[in-house]
């Protein structure tokens, strides 16, 4: 039991690091690659890794044709749309700030679940968490919305917030689906996503940045695809299936902090105390919505 507990905490630590640093890696990759091309590489590399895990575990494909529309919607809302919005946002918004804004995802999930699921009521404590979380977001984006024009950061900030809504819809929709092998679902969604983006991604890269890339930029892309998408997806499903989503929810506090540290310390992105206060407010909001004792 102790060995399994150590394994799960190790996997959780891995997810926090790779998903936290992913925002900084995307910022570096954008110096050489188009946002859509980055997303496509993440998907096909991730699909390859998860497919190898799936075959290693001697699994057989059990999903019928009726699952392909569901897998497509899961891929759109959980991979293509949020990945693309995050990459596009980081063209104008520092990766540390995007990481902070993504901390709103559990709050967005709660709001959608309240309307779409019967067992997720919006209690007064959770409602207070929603208000505190949105106040933190307002601290970050309010000044840009009021003073900046189209050339400011607010379009990218809004894109990051839309990514949290897409992730939230994905999570709520997945809860409404019949139980299936999570690794098979992961393989299906990543393969479909990579197939849908193949032509647009190649066209965008060739028409934009081109193929004049460096070994370092390719290495960053491989790290995003293999480590932060493929291996991370496998670790995610191991933790969820063996320990449950409650244990995994710890990452909601840690990933934004790692993303903020990676952006400010590693990439030397500008920051102010409003970023620290906003991060603290959003995490307090996340903590309030996850309190179960009085719900």
Image: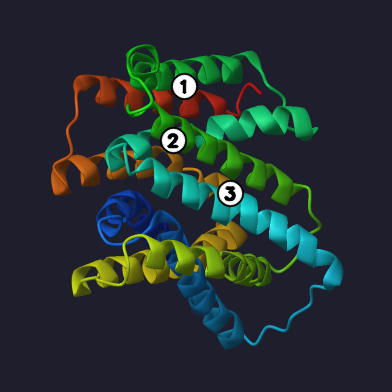
Which of the two discs, 1 and 2, labels the residue nearer the N terminus? 2
The secondary structure type at the circle numbered 2 is helix
Residue 169 - label: none
Query: Picture coordinates of residue 150 (x, y %)?
Result: 38, 26
Please tell me which of labels 3 and 2 falls first in the chain.
2
For marks 1 and 2, give the CA distance: 9 Å
Badge count: 3
Quote the CA–CA distance across marks 3 and 2: 16 Å
Q: Is residue 213 visible?
A: yes
Whether the residues at callouts 1 and 2 have beta carbons within 8 Å, the answer is yes
Residue 133: mark in rendering: 1
* Contact (Cβ within 8 Å) of mark 3 with mark 1: no
Q: Tell me if residue 118 comes above or below residue 62 in the rendering.
A: above
**As drawn, 57 above or below 149:** below
- Could you say which quadrant of the image residue 216 lies in? bottom left
- The residue that label 2 is drawn on is 103
Residue at figure coordinates x 13%, y 42% from the top left: 268
Q: Earlier in the sequence, mark 3 or mark 1?
A: 1
Query: Where is residue 190 shown, x and y percent of the image?
Result: 58, 67
**Residue depicted at x 68% and y 83%:** 59
- Mark 3 lies on a secondary structure that is helix
**C-alpha separation, residue under disc 3 versus residue under disc 1:** 21 Å
Q: Quadrant of residue 74?
A: bottom right
Q: Which mark is residue 245?
A: 3
């Amino acid at each position: 039991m102790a060995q399994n507990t150590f394994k799960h905490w190790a996997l959780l630590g891995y997810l926090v690091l790779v998903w936290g640093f992913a925002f900084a890696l995307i910022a570096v990759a954008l110096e050489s690659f188009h946002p859509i091309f980055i997303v496509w590489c993440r998907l096909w590399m991730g699909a390859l890794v998860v497919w190898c895990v799936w075959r290693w575990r001697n699994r057989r494909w059990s999903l019928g044709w009726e699952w392909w529309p569901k897998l497509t919607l899961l891929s759109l809302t959980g991979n293509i749309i949020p990945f693309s919005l995050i990459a596009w946002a980081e063209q104008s918004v520092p990766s540390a700030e995007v990481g902070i804004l993504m901390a709103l995802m559990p709050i967005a999930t709660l709001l959608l679940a309240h309307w779409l699921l019967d067992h997720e009521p919006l209690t007064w404590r959770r409602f207070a968490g929603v208000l505190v979380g949105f106040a933190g977001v307002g601290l970050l984006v309010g000044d840009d919305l009021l003073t900046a024009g189209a050339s400011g950061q607010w379009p990218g900030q809004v894109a990051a917030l839309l990514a949290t809504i897409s992730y939230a819809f994905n999570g709520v929709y997945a809860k409404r689906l019949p139980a299936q092998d999570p690794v098979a679902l992961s393989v299906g969604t990543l393969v479909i996503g990579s197939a849908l983006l193949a032509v647009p991604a190649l066209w965008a890269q060739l028409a934009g940045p081109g193929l004049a890339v460096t070994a370092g930029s390719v290495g960053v892309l491989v790290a995003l695809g293999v480590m932060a998408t493929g291996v991370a997806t496998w670790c995610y499903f191991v933790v969820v299936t063996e320990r449950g989503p409650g244990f995994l929810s710890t990452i909601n506090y840690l990933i934004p902090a790692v993303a903020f540290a990676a952006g400010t310390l590693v990439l030397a992105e500008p920051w102010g105390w409003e970023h620290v206060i906003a991060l603290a407010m959003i995490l307090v909001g996340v903590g309030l919505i996850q309190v179960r004792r009085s719900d």
